[in-house]
Amino acid sequence: MFHFKRSSLSLALSLAGVIAGVTLLSSCDNVTNSSKDALVIDGKTMGTFYRVSLLGVDKSREPELRKQIEAQLAEDDHEMSTYKEDSVLSRFNQYLGTAPQPISAGMADAIVTSLRIGQKTGGEMDITVGPLVNLWGFGPQKQPTKTPTDEQIAAARQEIGLQHLKVIQQSDGQYLQKDMPNMYVDLSTVGEGYATDHLARLIEANGISNYLVSVGGAVVSRGHNPKGNPWQVAIQKPTDKDNEVQAIVDLQGMGISTSGSYRNYYELDGKRLSHIIDPATGHPITHKLVSATVIASTALEADGWDTGLMVLGTKKAMALAEKEHLAVYLITKTPEGFEVHMTPQFKAYLREPE
């Protein structure tokens, strides 16, 4: 399965509409007219949860749609999992050579997007950071019993770097190449967005134009909800309490993704360690930015940016978001409570709850 960057919610909460950082609104209203009800298909997948809300779809189509949805999710898992030894990505990581290895067009797009965002963040969003993720116990390996040493961190940092990875487009397909045999690529930072976009395309291929789709903390919507309005989602307050709403956004057919340091963590040697690793230091982040939400044309794009911004911290993240004209909403923890920073592009999506 993917080790998604935020996957600590219970099934009960997910089925109630809480999706790791965002809460789905207007997707399962108790409308008495059955023709206005949204058909909801949800479940567990790849270490997190998925939820598909469909409007104007007869319930008789649910079994076939669920079959297609879960087949698509299984296919994505087979490509990008770091937990399954026979996945495309795991086989690439196990390969100790430097010859180009075949990958799918979708996986190539995810990696190209990740490399582009990684370069724009100065390497802070780094899909080659796998050795450090594993060293700190946030990958397939078990959590360490003691803090990694400076020597271990330095050794792991020698095996990472976006410049050592490239996608090659050829007439017969796409290939992924590394110039360091021991390089370990981890796509969990974009896995939720990748899967969400795939489900959205699947839904549209079935002739459905009004839907809300989510995998983990990534969401995509099209059309309108059962009330005839654009679909809305709520950004959660970054606390251990669920369903506390920080802000409401109208997606307007866009993708949204939230990354946070407040759910996926563990304590070691008396310190609370975030799952978000800073490639520049080799350590989990320690700054006060606790949540980053990005709205973009695709969930994949939003999913890539939110992690990079989380690593950067509030000041650098806002500066980059403004430079790149991104729709970004940041929540920072202060002694007085939570402080919000957002770009003008994000303000256009803020709404009052229905």
Image (spheres, grey):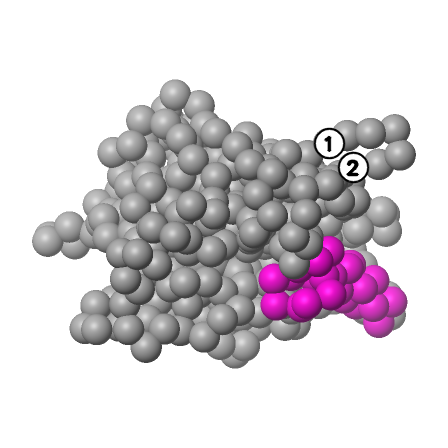
Q: Nearer the viewer, residue 36 or 218?
A: 218
Left or right: 148 in relation to 172:
left
Work out which quarter of the rendered image holds the N terminus and state it. bottom right
Is 323 located above or below residue 42 in the figure?
A: above
2 and 1 marks in contact (CB < 8 Å): yes
Residue 109 at x, y percent in the picture: 69, 37
Relative vertical location of residue 196 with respect to residue 52 in this rendering, above or below: above
Q: Tell me the quarter of the picture where residue 179 sits.
A: top right
Task: Provide the secondary structure element on which disc 2 rests.
Answer: strand
Give the number of callouts.
2
Q: What stretch is highlighted in magenta?
A: 63-91
- For marks 2 and 1, give the CA distance: 6 Å
For image coordinates 68% across by 34% down, the residue present is 167
The residue shown at (45%, 70%) is 8
Disc assigned to residue 39: none
Q: Is the magenta stretch mostly helix, strand or loop?
A: helix
Of the numbered discs 2 and 1, the one sitting upstream in the chain is: 1
Residue 18 in view in this figure: no
* Residue 208 locus on image (x, y percent): 80, 49
Q: Which amino acid does label 2 sit on?
A: Gln
Percent x, y of residue 326: 45, 29
Q: What element carries label 1?
A: strand
* Local crowd size for mark 2, using a 10 Å CA cut-off: few (<14), some (14–19), many (≥20): some
- Is any atom of residue 178 visible in this view? yes
Q: Report the residue marked by disc 2.
A: 174
Q: Residue at x 72, y 61 (%)?
A: 87
Residue 288 at x, y percent in the picture: 22, 49
Residue type at tag 1: Ile
Write down the residue under mark 1.
168
